[in-house]
Amino acid sequence: MILRHARPQVEAALARQAAVALIGPRQVGKTTLALDIAADRPAIYLDLEATADREKLSDPVLFLGRHADKLVILDEIHRMPALFEALRGIIDSGRRAGQRTGRFLILGSAAIDLLRQSGESLAGRIEYVDLTPLCAIELAGDDALHRLWVRGGFPESFLSASDADSFQTRRSFIRTYLERDVPMFGPRIPAETLERLWSMLAHNQGTLLNASRLASGLAVSAPTVTSYIGLLVDLLLVRRLPPFHANVGKRLVKSPKTYVRDSGLVHALLGIETYDELLGHPVVGPSWEGFVIENLLAAAPNRTRASFYRTARGAEIDLLLELGGRHGTWAIEIKRGLAAKAEKGFYIAVADLQPARAFLVYSGTERYPKGDGVEAIGVRELAEELSSLV
C-alpha cells in the first residue's frame, strides 16, 4: 500500500465538513484510498455503477438515515446526480441533531459534473480534495522516479510487472476513456477524432495552444477543438497552463500552454514503451517538463496559482507558483539532464518579475546555488519543500 499524499487532507476535511468530494481521473486510486480511510471507522461503501447499490438509494433519505452513525462512501456519484439534492436535506437534518462532520465521502472522475451539481446543492456543506496520480513525494529512490516518469502515476500502470504490461494497461485506459467515459460526461464525440486530438496534444506537449492549427489537422472548427480540449481538461486528463499577466512594460504571450497531465499517457499516445525509447524521442524534453510541473503542483498548497511567463522577445519562466502570504512567488526553470544550466531568457524573466525564490529543476538530486539567487534542485526535493508549506 503506497501512502497517498492526499490522505491527511481527506481526513482533515472530514473533520471539518459534513461532505468531502475526492476528485480525480478514473483508476487513479480514489476507491482504494476511500476504503483505506473507511477501515479506521464505521463506514458503508456504495458503488453507484452497480445496479444493486443504486436501487438501495431509491429512497435515499430512508436508506441513509439508517446509517447516520457511519461514514457513507458514494463512488461514481455522476451516476446519480439527483442525489445531491437529497444529501443537502440529510446533512442539514444531521446538523440539527449534532452530526456536523464526516458524513459523506463522495468520489468522482470529473471535476465539471461534481462542481456543477454539488455547487448548487451543497454550498457550504462540502469540501473538495484532488487526488492526482502517484507523484514523486509518495515514492522513494531514483529508480522509482524514472519508472514514474516513463509509466506515469496511475497505480496499475506504475505497479505493472513489466514495461510491456504497463504500456498495454495505459492503452486500455485510453480506449476505455474514449469509448465509455467521454460519452458519459460530454457530447458524443467520435472516438477516433478525440484520440487523434489527444495524440496531437501529446506531440505538442508544453507548447502554446493553437486551436486553428489543431482544427485543420482534424477537419473541424477551432471552436470545436477548444470545446474538445475543455472536456479533456474537465476530465483531469489535460492541463491548460495560463500565461502570467503583469504590468511589466513588455509584450507578453497570451495563449495558454497545454500538457497531457500524466507522462505515462503521453508516452502511450506516442507509442513509447521503454525508458530507452523515450530518451531517443523528440518529446523527451517536453515530457520531462510536464512531468515536473504535475509533480510540483500535486505537492503545492491548494491555494497555489500556477502559470508561465513568456515575453515576445524570449524571456521565459516555465512555471510560476504564486503561493501567497509570506512565501510569495516562486520561479521555476525545468531542464532535463545532469548538467543544470538555465537559459539567458530565464534570468531576464527573473529580473523582470523579482520572485521571492528561483529554482532550476534538473534530473539530478544534488542541491546547490547557481548564482543570481537561482538554486539547482531535484524534482523530489522541491516537491517535498512545497508540500511542507503552511
Image (cartoon, grey):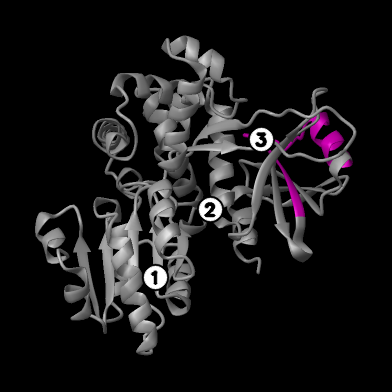
Q: Position of residue 12 (x, y in %)?
A: 48, 75
Q: CA distance from mark 1 to mark 2?
A: 22 Å
Crowd band around label 2 with a 10 angstrom C-alpha radius: few (<14), some (14–19), many (20+) = many
Left or right placement of residue 337 versus residue 52 in this view: right
Mark closest to the chain's N terminus, 1 or 3:
1
Looking at the image, is 4 positioned above or below residue 164?
Answer: below
Q: Is residue 334 magenta?
A: yes
Give the quarter of the figure containing the C terminus.
Answer: bottom right
* Residue interval drawn in magenta: 329-351
The three-letter amino acid code for the residue at tag 1 is Ala
Question: Which of the two labelled residues, at mark 2 and mark 3, occupies the earlier sequence position?
Answer: 2
Instruction: Name the one closer to the observer, 232 or 200.
Output: 232
Q: Residue at x 76, y 35 (%)?
A: 342
| Local SS, label 2 | helix
Q: Quadrant of the N terminus?
A: bottom left
Residue 103 can be seen, yes or no: no
Q: Quadrant location of residue 161?
A: top left
Asked whether, in this view, residue 281 is left or right of residue 159, the answer is: right
Instruction: Give the label, 1 or 2, closer to the camera.
Output: 1
What is the number of the mark on residue 19? Answer: 1
Nearer-the-camera pick, 118 or 241? 118
Q: Residues within 10 Å of mark 3 (few under 14, many from 20)?
A: many
Tell me what residue is drawn at x 53 percent, y 24 percent: 283
- For residue 335, which numbered disc appears in the image? 3
Disc 2 target residue: 298
